[in-house]
Amino acid sequence: MVSLLRLIAAAICLTLSLAHAIPARNYGNRWNIARRSVSLDLTRNPDYAPNGPAAYARALKKWGAEVPSELVHSLAAMKANVGEVGAASIRGDREFLSRVGYGTPPQYLDVDFDTGSSDVWVYTSETRKHVAGGRPVWVIEDSKTAKRVHNATWMIAYGDGSHAWGNVYKDTLSIGNITLPAAVIESATSASLSLTNDPDIDGIFGLAYGLPSQTEPQQPSVLSALTPLLSAPVFTADLQYHSSCGAYTFGYIDHARHTANTTIHYTPLVADATFWQFGYTGLHVGGQNVWYLSERWTAIADTGTTLLLLGADVVELYYATGVPGARHNTSIGGIWTYPCAGPALPDFEIGMANGWVATVPGRFMNYSVMPDDPATCMGGLQTFGLADFGIFGDIFLKAVYAVFDVGGARIGFADKPLDLE
Ligand SMILES: *[C@@H]1O[C@H](CO)[C@@H](O)[C@H](O)[C@H]1NC(C)=O
Ligand SMILES: *[C@@H]1O[C@H](CO)[C@@H](O)[C@H](O)[C@H]1NC(C)=O
Ligand SMILES: *[C@@H]1O[C@H](CO)[C@@H](O)[C@H](O)[C@H]1NC(C)=O
Ligand SMILES: *[C@@H]1O[C@H](CO)[C@@H](O)[C@H](O)[C@H]1NC(C)=O
Ligand SMILES: *[C@@H]1O[C@H](CO)[C@@H](O)[C@H](O)[C@H]1NC(C)=O
């Protein structure tokens, strides 16, 4: 069912792009380049690295000479080191799903790319039937290349209390056009109800910066094995509000996905980072005069968390100054709610240490209607227990183009157009 919905959604993205087809300019391949204005075609790609061998092949073709087959093969191999994988919104942006191939031949499953953890696990033919439910699983026996890592096990407990565990395999992963051989894939023999209750997710694909995977004995994380193979040691996330047109790219920055005349604004990760953790210095509630500043704030960029979570004091400032009728409802664990019929929520601005300001639009800040009360809405900004620490989940990431620069130990953000969604 999910697969079908995703096919339809992908077809819509494709139709849009064909309707506005822009003459070819190859920034890495993608189908919804049409969300840009045509003027983008005239801007230069600031990070463009010339590909000498490709230029040579083009020159040979142009002058009618035969392109040596070795050159064709080596160009194909170079191209294979970048990949794009769609990111489809599920159930009002609760999560985004991406399709990854497991084993040989690839069995495609819909997984949640999670920059907040490091384990790559899926439901498999080993998963107890009542745990896997009706979802597709990785049938290990059907892969010609699967190898059990004997005596290795894994067990993960996420911040929300959910957990999963099982056996460890090595097998090929197909991530867009990238083929990663002998990747450590964790097979879930079981998982907690909070995970299995989500029928859309076939597994979680951890992409934390340097966190070891929760395997015993310790196995290398997929990101650490993947990075050296990439054309450039980066991956990017373009999550899109209530849309299936978002994407992750691996090995390249897709400049067609951010605003044409902006550059990527990088912030270094904190020292000894295990997560994608970096400092930010300012917060501003739209329509107010005051900026709140601190030198102590850090946050992690976490594609696997739905909400934007910050310290109690700044969250209260947002709702107290910007949202009439907002309540911190302690009887439901301290969730901030407000009347759905109230005025539009204000934008929320976050200033990075490098001076760049991310704007999360007010309509992104209005996350959902309360399940038990259609007149009450719940904000996308909620409280996290630690005063100076934040989790920039999807509410934030949907508002930016995010570059996870593994090689540079930094994270980059750029504006992207948000108006067509
Ligand atoms: C992946 O490969 C297909 C088929 O060769 C090609 O059309 C597509 O552009 C490639 N995508 C990327 C991101 O390299
Ligand atoms: C697995 O563990 C058992 C018992 O500890 C041991 O006898 C066996 O040699 C181990 N196998 C491998 C492949 O490490
Ligand atoms: C970038 O483009 C936008 C419109 O797309 C324009 O408003 C803005 O002034 C431009 N900025 C620069 C620095 O050229
Ligand atoms: C808190 O939430 C509960 C459950 O949605 C609701 O019944 C109650 O009225 C709310 N309290 C306030 C003060 O809004
Ligand atoms: C919040 O979003 C809901 C739909 O999810 C909408 O019905 C409601 O009017 C919005 N409220 C505000 C204050 O933006």
Image (tube, rainbow, N blue to C red):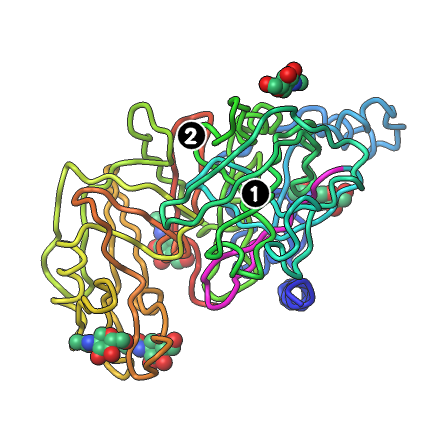
* Res 295 seen here: yes
Residue 373, image x and y in percent? Answer: 32, 81
On whether residue 93 falls in the magenta region, the answer is: yes
Q: CA distance from mark 1 to mark 2?
A: 21 Å
Residue 211 image label: 2
Q: Secondary structure at mark 2?
A: loop
Ligand 5 is in which quadrant of the figure? bottom left
162 over 58 or under it: above or below:
below
Q: Which residues are magenta?
A: 86-103
Q: Nearer the viewer, residue 103 or 169?
A: 169
Q: Residues within 10 Å of mark 2 (few under 14, many from 20)?
A: many
Residue 392, image x and y in percent? Answer: 33, 49
Residue 227 image label: none
Q: Would you identify the image quadrant in which residue 144 lies?
A: top right
Residue at the image point whose x is 12% and y is 67% from the top? 320
Q: Would you identify the image quadrant in which residue 366 lies?
A: bottom left
**Circle 1 residue:** 249
Looking at numbered disc 1 in the image, what kind of residue is underneath it?
Thr
Looking at numbered disc 2 in the image, what kind of residue is underneath it?
Leu
Ligand 1 lies under 8 Å from the Cβ of mark 1? yes
